Image (tube, helix red, strand yellow):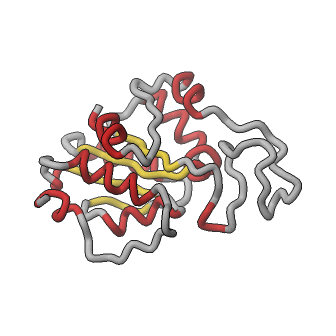
């Protein structure tokens, strides 16, 4: 596909084999088919998901940890004609960036936030994130995560986000359909 080829870079993809990020990347490319890539901007956080910045041939910025949401909100204010996609991890969004997530709902900026929720800080040895299941064992909690996981859907709805959805990365067609919505 010509558009998919235009969205790809020559950078070698370095995600671990079997990582759902490969599928999210393909879902995004499928979603953007037929769109003018010059009318799209991206913001990414820090983490494995953030490497998507290197694999999508789109304008944008790679942000500080937990700061991709306010950066994307700034892009929407400065350039309201752009479609803005935000790629963030669950730690990036629901730990360091939790206040930005809540206020993004309050302000309801015209952007699409894609949270890669693997329930761990995978780039830095697999520590628990706020969405990790209780008893998840990791180096920081060898006896298991003591806390109940945060429910990001409830938080998004309580923050008045106008569209909230959850997908399974391995279903590329469904994920693309949801992203188009």
- Taking the spot 45% from the left edge, 38% from the top edge, the residue there is 167
Residue at the location (37% across, 34% down)? 109
Left or right: where does residue 23 sit relative to residue 80? right
The x and y percentages for residue 3 are 14, 57
Note whether 140 is above or below 107 in the view shown.
below
Asked if residue 5 lies left or right of residue 126, the reply is left
> In the rendered view of the protein, which quadrant contains the C terminus?
top left
Residue 111: give x, y in percent of width and height: 34, 39
Q: Please, is residue 118 above or below residue 133 in the view?
A: below
User: x%, y% of residue 75?
Assistant: 32, 48
- Horizontal arrangement in the rendering, residue 22 relative to residue 27 (left or right): right
Quarter occupied by the N terminus:
bottom left
Query: Is 18 in front, or is 100?
Result: 18
Left or right? Give the position of 30 relative to 115: left
Task: Measuring from the top left, give residue 104's x and y in whole percent.
Answer: 47, 35
Q: How many marks?
A: 0
Position above or below: 181 against 5 = above
Nearer-the-camera pick, 151 or 111: 151
Q: Residue furthest right?
A: 143
Question: Which residue occupies 16% across, 63% down?
Answer: 6
Quarter assignment of residue 164: top left
């Amino acid at each position: 596909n010509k558009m998919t080829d235009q969205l790809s870079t020559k950078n070698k993809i370095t995600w671990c084999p079997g990582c759902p990020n490969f599928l999210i990347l393909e879902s995004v490319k499928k979603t953007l088919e037929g769109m003018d890539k010059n009318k799209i901007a991206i913001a990414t956080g820090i983490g494995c998901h953030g490497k998507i910045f290197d694999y999508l041939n789109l304008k944008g910025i790679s942000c500080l940890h937990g700061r991709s949401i306010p950066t994307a909100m700034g892009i929407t204010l400065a350039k309201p004609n752009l479609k803005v996609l935000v790629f963030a991890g669950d730690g990036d969004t629901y730990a360091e960036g939790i206040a930005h997530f809540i206020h993004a709902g309050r302000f309801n900026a015209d952007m699409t936030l894609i949270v890669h929720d693997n329930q761990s800080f995978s780039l830095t040895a697999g520590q628990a994130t706020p969405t990790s299941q209780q008893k998840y064992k990791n180096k920081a909690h060898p006896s298991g995560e003591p806390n109940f996981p945060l429910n990001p859907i409830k938080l998004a709805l309580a923050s008045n986000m106008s569209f909230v959805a959850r997908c399974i990365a391995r279903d590329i067609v469904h994920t693309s359909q949801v992203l188009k919505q």
